[in-house]
Image (cartoon, rainbow, N blue to C red):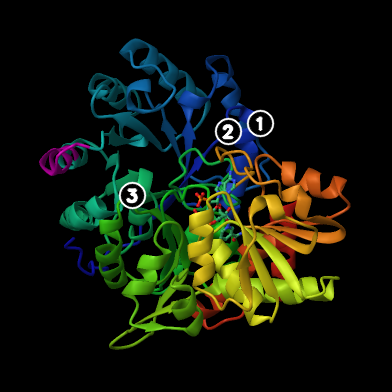
Amino acid sequence: MTAEAPQSSHPKPQLVVTLPGRTPDELRHEFRRASEAGADLVEVRLDRIPAGDVEGLATIHQIPMDYEWIPAILTLRSRSEGGEGPDEETARLSLLQRALEVLPFTYVDLELARDLRIARSLRDSYGRNLGQIFSAHLVESTPLGLLRKTLRDSLEIGSYGKVVLPATVGRTLGELVPLAREFAGQHYVLHTTGPSGPLLRVLAAPLGMGLVYASLPGDGSQTVEPSQLPADRMRSFLDAKKGTPWLAVMGHPIRHSRSPLVHHRFLEQVGLPWLYVALDLVEAEEFRPALTALKTLGLRGVNVTLPYKELAAELADLKEEEVVTSGAANTLAWETGSPGALHAFNTDVSALARILTEVGEEGWSGESLLVLGAGGASRAVIAAGVEQGAHVFVTGRDRARVERTVQDFPSEFVSYLPPDALRPEGLVVNATPVGMAGSAPLSVPLEKAFRRGGILLDLVYSPADPFLRRAAEQAGVRYLGGGRMLVYQAAESFERFTGRKAPQQLMSELVREVDG
Ligand code: NAP
């Protein structure tokens, strides 16, 4: 990877918000939200709108309007390039003309591969009143030379040239960041999807891009492209002073991580214009070089999740005690200034210690607990339990693995309990993925450990199948979801990254939102 600190003396990119709406009503509402979030432009995806509703787009621009109209881009993404619109020229031109007749679009986004004749025809009709963005959605294996040529060609004929392709973090750092620097200051867009998705969006300003595409503010559930970052956060970041840091969570897979949402809420509340993004490191070999390269590109700190927590602990220059005892780190942060040593923390352990203190206040005796699972989360529970002086029983489906985990802790505090020897416990912790979408069914009779009036702490948050919750409640056991763990470990990491405390009231709100 050869990424170097990019130049940043270019005008800042225009912020485009892609509206996910499929009906004129939805789009009208979203237009206002984009405008309020500080968008410079909105993108209307014509291919997502049923053909019969195209004339209805006129209602978006009804006068009087209760929001500020901002320039709009009309995009008709073809099926060939990952959209829902037609590939065929006559059908494309007809749809575009119908939409252009009813709404005052400033730009039309045309596909370099299929719309050259349409471009001429629209130029004849609208002249300079309608700018043309030329885009190409390419496959992952597209060679660097072809990417460069496509960007050059699209810039030559359009007001803006845009290339989008899926890319790993490794390729983005090694090839695409240097490629982007060749075009810095021109009206270009180079975005990726897939594992590196948000990365070039974070770097859009220092890389001198013309436009950067974002989603509506919120939890991202309505996003057209999952790699897009929320417009309000993007706006603050673009308006902040040069060199404003950013943060990331790294792991594989990472798509379902709620950490960006939680950290963005913390950042917003304390008034820091930083961004927080999820990067999927598909190969372990990407991890070390990515950290080094991303640091030079403004990354201040990282949350680390499966399967890189042990690797993160190994790479750090300085390790807090919890990292040494658990052998795993979920938080890496560089100290500011030179030499900028990399510190490793395990805020899973400190979050769990806090949760155990709370459940102690909520009725758990503090004498003993049972943990199901023998992976990283289980180790964090064991470490926190031992720290509190409780006896921790550990059970799981793979006896050898559980015993290996148990052996790493003092035997007077931690012991293996076979699944067929389970007995009622005041506190039971699920430290396995059971309940998550795609996970295997529970293979241990955990309900035997339920004690009426006791507590089940499920580390899984928002489970796709809430059967553990049902089983606990039927047995008269209080169920606590994984929201507390998510939010508490994030809050502790946030403090390490920013030196600021996450606001307590917001933390409680987020736990309620996550656990429902
Ligand atoms: P891990 O290292 O992969 O370990 C998972 C453990 O669960 C292993 O011991 C595995 O057993 C066991 N397991 C998996 N499926 C099972 C099943 N169907 N029945 C019984 N045991 C099963 O994962 P981890 O890092 O410890 O994380 C575990 C879970 O904790 C995650 O999936 C996540 O949902 C949750 N977590 C939540 C937070 C939060 O912020 N709320 C933070 C960290 C983790 P084998 O050894 O036999 O494979």
Mark earlier in primary sequence (1, 3): 1
Which residue is tagged 2?
21
The 10 Å Cα crowd at callout 1, few under 14, some 14 to 19, many 20 or more, is some
Residue that numbered label 3 is attached to: 282
Q: Which numbered mark, 2 or 3, is in the foreground of this view?
A: 3
Give the alpha-carbon distance from disc 2 to disc 1, as whole Å: 8 Å
Query: What is the spatial separation of the Cα atoms under label 2 and label 3, in whole angstroms?
Result: 32 Å
Q: Residue at x 13, y 38 (%)?
A: 146
Q: Amino acid at mark 1?
A: Asp
In the drawing, what numbered circle is on residue 25?
1
Circle 3: element type? loop
Magenta-tinted stretch: 141-150
The residue that appears at 45% across and 71% down in the rendered structure is 329
| Type of amino acid under label 3 | Val
Please tell me which residue is depicted at 40% across the width and 67% down the height of the picture: 310
Q: Under tag 2, what secondary structure?
A: loop
Residue 84: within the magenta? no
